[in-house]
Image (tube, rainbow, N blue to C red):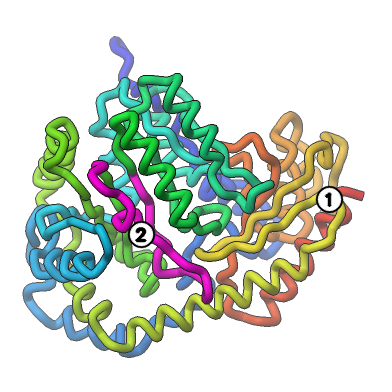
Amino acid sequence: MRRKIVHVGAKQLTYEIRQIVTVADEISRLGKTIIWENIGDPVEKGAEIEPWMKEIIMRLTAENSSYRYTASQGDLKTRRFLSDRLSGQEGADAGADDIIFFNGLGDAVAKIFGFLKREARILGPSPAYSTHSSAEAAHSGYEHLTYKLDPENAWLPDIEDIRNKVKYNDSIAGILLINPDNPTGIVYSREILQQIVDIASEHDLFIIADETYCNVVFPDVEFTYIGEVIGDVPAISMKSISKEYPWPGARCGWIEVYNRHKDEEFDDYILSLINAKRLEVCSTTLPQLSIPEIMGDPRYPEHLSRQSAVLSSRADQAFEALRGIAGIRVIKPQAALYFTVLFDDGALNENQSLVISEPEIRTYIEGITAGMPLDKRFVYYLLGAEGICVVPLTGFCSDLKGFRFTLLETDDKKREGVYKAIAARVKEFLS
């Protein structure tokens, strides 16, 4: 073309969670059944939506109001409902006008990073959730700036690393945290959150807190919302219904903005996000209308508790299957839908492989794994040998080697078989 048209950050848009599907589809074409452990869709893995939730949604679909445009920031009744719930949180301060709905948090992430000045960088965790890391890197045109989540400290953030990165890089305008974390499943303590807020306050930064899994916290684990400790620091909290109802196909997420008017620059930035939604007209109406009725139902807290208990039990099952294997470390998650396995330093090399009985699949895997990150090499061999599709940890903007799989399989026998197969193949690969 006579002019270059590709955005400077286009090559930063990578999403290993979905990209591995291309390889899995080829292996499926060659005759192997694929077990999808790469993506957090509870419904795809057999989760049943509560009948009373379905009844509410079906009733809403019979109402004409479900088919109209809604307000650009989101349905006002729903935003007031969410704001009233926030008023019960210590320290949280966000009115209905401080809540903005998006077509899923992927939409929110794209706009949050896309409408930042290019030179303004956001410091995020590593391992990182790919949607955030790719969007931040694409917005800037450079690799995503990260701080360490420390596996030697139960995957909690390395506060000194955050402090030093912020102190010596004045392009950093904000700090991203994912709490509960994806991919590690760790829950940040109140003390850790307060230390991050203090750093932001000291250096005049804002905070983005992805709290997607705030209601998928395992029993006996204490969760602190960013709004409880934010003080006067400008911040954005991100939430959705995808993992809670669960209704991932609704593509319904929102942000809650704290202390918007306490900083003129931050206020103008939030206004740009609102204006961007106005250009779209609005986000999808029906899922928004369901929120006050479902979340306000007395059966909802019981649903969340039951769901979290089930996921915690599955995490225990995965931990027992993998603990004690030489060459890996496993840290039991405290929340969310995932389990992460970390390979020890030096445990992997480019000569390792797995027995793949089908010649065509073996030839295919051997042909694509040369020169790739060593944990990704294991992931592809696992896919070829067992048809189990997991995600390499290096796909989460991390130098650490490992992999992530889900806790979502509802068939008890199948889930046990998957965890045992993963454990057996890890042993074989490292032997």
Nearer to me, 302 or 31: 302
Does the magenta portion include 10?
no
Q: Position of residue 196 (x, y in %)?
A: 42, 42
Q: Earlier in the sequence, mark 1 or mark 2?
A: 2
Q: How many marks?
A: 2
Q: CA distance from mark 1 to mark 2?
A: 52 Å
Q: Within 10 angstroms of label 2, few (less than 14), some, or many (20 or more) residues?
A: many
SS label for mark 2: loop
Report the residue at 48% width, 46% height from top. Answer: 129
Q: Look at the picture and state if 401 lies above or below 173.
A: below
Q: Look at the picture and state if 2 lies above or below 316.
A: above
SS label for mark 1: helix
- View extreme (right): residue: 431
State the extent of the magenta-drawn residues as a range.
Answer: 208-234
Q: Position of residue 192 (x, y in %)?
A: 47, 49
Nearer to me, 63 or 107: 107
Give the amino acid type for the residue marked by disc 2 in the picture. Tyr
Q: Position of residue 17 (x, y in %)?
A: 53, 49
Report the residue at 55% width, 58% height from top. Answer: 185
- Marking on residue 225: 2
The main secondary structure of the magenta stretch is: loop
Quarter of the view holding residue 325: bottom right
Nearer the observer: mark 1 or 2; the answer is 2
Check the picture and name the quadrant holding the N terminus. Answer: top left
Report the residue at 62% width, 80% height from top. Answer: 411
Residue matched to label 1: 359
Instruction: Decide if residue 158 is on the left or right side of residue 305.
Output: right
